[in-house]
Amino acid sequence: MNTTAGRVSIITVNFNQAAVTEAMLASVFLHNDYPGIEIIVVDNGSTMNPVPAWQLQYPGVQFIRSEKNTGFAGGNNIGIRQAKGEFLFLVNNDTEFTPGLVTQLVNTLIAYPETGMVSPKIRYYQQPDILQYAGFTRMNFFTARNHCIGQFEKDNGQYDSASGTTGYVHGAAMMIKRAAIEKAGSMKENYFLYYEEMDWCESIKRQGYDIRVDTQALIYHKESVSVGQKSALKEYFMNRNRVLFIRRNAGWYHKIVFYPYFILVVTPRNIISYIKNGQWSFIAILFRAIWWNLSHTVNSPEQGYRPK
């Protein structure tokens, strides 16, 4: 363990999932062996404010209450602004730490000065031998599609020697150097939910950093505890933000292919899927997602319509 490394700020965001957040904190206390950490929990406008009770239960943890839900990026940015660490470890509240996780990621960032961000290998908590993430392929900016490496595969160690540069970190667990944030800025809050960490990766890469996955580090993820596997909220922001990501990050030559592809291929395909599954209300949600991009700039704040 590199005991001369800088402080780590562990940041997580809670929204109406107090018990899930408490389980995550318990896993940090149980498994962390890194000597210099601070833990910051942002409550992102939960209906019932858990912070007063938490402050009594966890006197060593810093709790911040936002009176409104500012989304994934907004909630994490609140924590980032208060963090004092040289390294910031942003983790979903529905994750479970494993022994040596923080130390391994810190040592990776120190060993590779050109790296700005790193994610660990991720397995599904409910199916602990099944992989969720062992890296991402690079983005195809003509279609806004890429591939999550290892997802749904049984983890037989096939990626344990595959640590290296990757297309993107995973938003469920990502450690970032403070120096990279100072150069690239924080996450764009108008994404609200989905694609914001990929946009952040692109911003950090433009500053000369690379992105890594460290498959020697492991975290478990209780996927979609807050949002659900299929919801109006997810459909809206996945579609809206897919287009927004291209608008913000792709070249003009990508856009002249992507826009017709999205309208002529993706949109009809999604509508057919909604009809087959009896999800008629999702059709209007899809068109609202498209209209947002037609009627807003890439820096417009996320306001107004949010599916329930």
Image (tube, grey):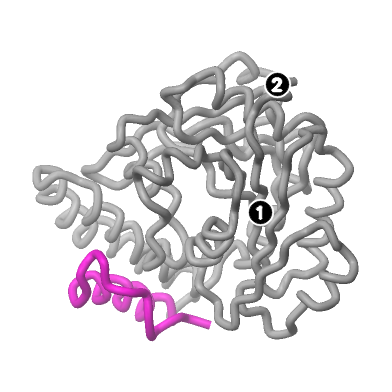
Q: Residue at x 78, y 70 (%)?
A: 18
Is residue 272 visible in the rendered image? The answer is no
Residue 300 magenta-highlighted? yes
Q: Residues within 10 Å of mark 2 (few under 14, many from 20)?
A: few
Three-letter amino acid code of the residue under disc 2:
Asn
Query: Circles 1 and 2: CB distance less than 8 Å?
Result: no
Q: Residue 212: x and y, percent? A: 49, 28
Residue 3 falls in which quadrant of the image? Answer: top right
Going by the image, does 198 lie left or right of 102?
Answer: left
Separation (CA) of disc 1 from disc 2: 31 Å
Q: Residue 306: x and y, percent? A: 45, 81
Q: Residue at x 24, y 48 (%)?
A: 249
Observer-nearest of 307 and 248: 248
Q: Which residues are magenta?
A: 281-308
Q: Residue at x 27, y 75 (%)?
A: 292
Q: Which residue is mark 1?
A: 223
In the rendered view, would you say 157 is above or below 203? above
Q: Which residue is mark 2?
A: 2
All told, the count of numbered labels is 2
Observer-nearest of 261 and 123: 123
In the rendered view, would you say 98 is above or below 10? above
In the rendered view, would you say 250 is above or below 109? below
Residue 271 falls in which quadrant of the image? Answer: bottom left
In the rendered structure, find residue 304 and report the number of the disc placed on it: none
Comparing marks 1 and 2, which lies closer to the viewer?
Answer: 2
Q: Residue 178: x and y, percent? A: 49, 42
Q: Residue 27: x and y, percent? A: 83, 47
Three-letter amino acid code of the residue under disc 1:
Glu
Residue 184 magenta-highlighted? no
